[in-house]
């Protein structure tokens, strides 16, 4: 079984919760885990989970926090790469809000030094040219 989920299909709040989620039991051979939840226990593989979030809300189209937690436990994907993706999105949002406001209203929303600090903060995450 392999990691089938696109990075972009990962929801940030579910990912954040997955980082704190620990399987009640895990079988590395079959890549199956069980999790204890508020409404009983859930059986989970890398592609399916029988919790309500996965079956009802996400309708099997995105991974729930259990699948994300199992993926981390099995080393099926790199959680640091997912964190970088979310940080990168935030960088683009934050910078485009700041610059967008400037170009729309011809008035800076912050001092030049603050723009520079913002650019420095995100420079590693943004494309270099
Ligand atoms: Zn689940």
Image (cartoon, rainbow, N blue to C red):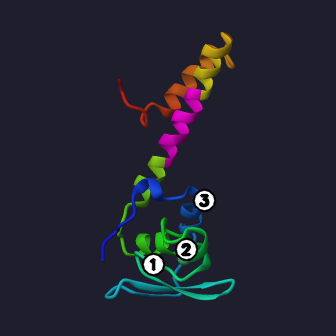
**Would you call the spot at circle 1 few (<14 residues within 10 Å), some (14-19), or many (20 or more)?**
some
Nearest to the eye among marks 1 and 3: give it: 1
**Would you call the spot at circle 2 few (<14 residues within 10 Å), some (14-19), or many (20 or more)?**
some
Q: Is the distance from the Cβ of mark 2 to the nearest ligand 1 atom less than 8 Å? A: yes
Q: Are marks 2 and 1 in contact (CB under 8 Å)?
A: yes
Closer-to-camera residue (84/93): 93
Q: Is the distance from the Cβ of mark 1 to the nearest ligand 1 atom less than 8 Å? A: no
Report the disc number at residue 54.
2
| Residue at figure coordinates x 48%, y 66% from the top left | 61
Q: The magenta stretch spans which residues?
A: 86-96
Report the disc number at residue 13.
3
Q: Are marks 1 and 3 in contact (CB under 8 Å)?
A: no
SS at badge 2: helix
Q: Are marks 2 and 3 in contact (CB under 8 Å)?
A: no
Nearest to the eye among marks 2 and 3: give it: 2
- The numbered mark, 2 or 1, whose residue comes first in the sequence reads 1
Closer-to-camera residue (105/30): 105
Q: Relative to 100, does residue 60 appear above or below in the rendering?
A: below
- The numbered mark, 1 or 3, whose residue comes first in the sequence reads 3
Q: Is residue 72 magenta?
A: no
Residue, disc 1? 48
- The numbered mark, 2 or 3, whose residue comes first in the sequence reads 3
Ligand 1 occupies quarter = bottom right
Residue 30, position as x, y percentages in the image: 34, 88
Q: Quadrant of residue 20?
A: bottom right
**Would you call the spot at circle 3 few (<14 residues within 10 Å), some (14-19), or many (20 or more)?**
few
């Amino acid at each position: 079984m392999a990691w089938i989920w696109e990075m972009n299909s990962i929801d940030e709040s579910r990912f954040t919760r997955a980082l704190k989620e620990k399987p009640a039991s895990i079988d590395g051979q079959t890549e199956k885990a069980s999790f204890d939840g508020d409404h009983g226990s859930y059986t989970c593989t890398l592609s399916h989970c029988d919790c309500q979030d996965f079956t009802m809300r996400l309708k099997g189209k995105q991974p729930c926090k259990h699948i994300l937690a199992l993926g981390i436990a099995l080393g099926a994907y790199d959680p640091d790469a997912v964190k970088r993706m979310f940080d990168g999105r935030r960088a683009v949002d934050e910078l485009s809000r700041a610059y967008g406001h400037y170009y729309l209203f011809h008035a800076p929303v912050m001092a030049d030094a603050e723009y520079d600090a913002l650019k420095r903060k995100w420079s590693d995450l943004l494309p270099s040219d």
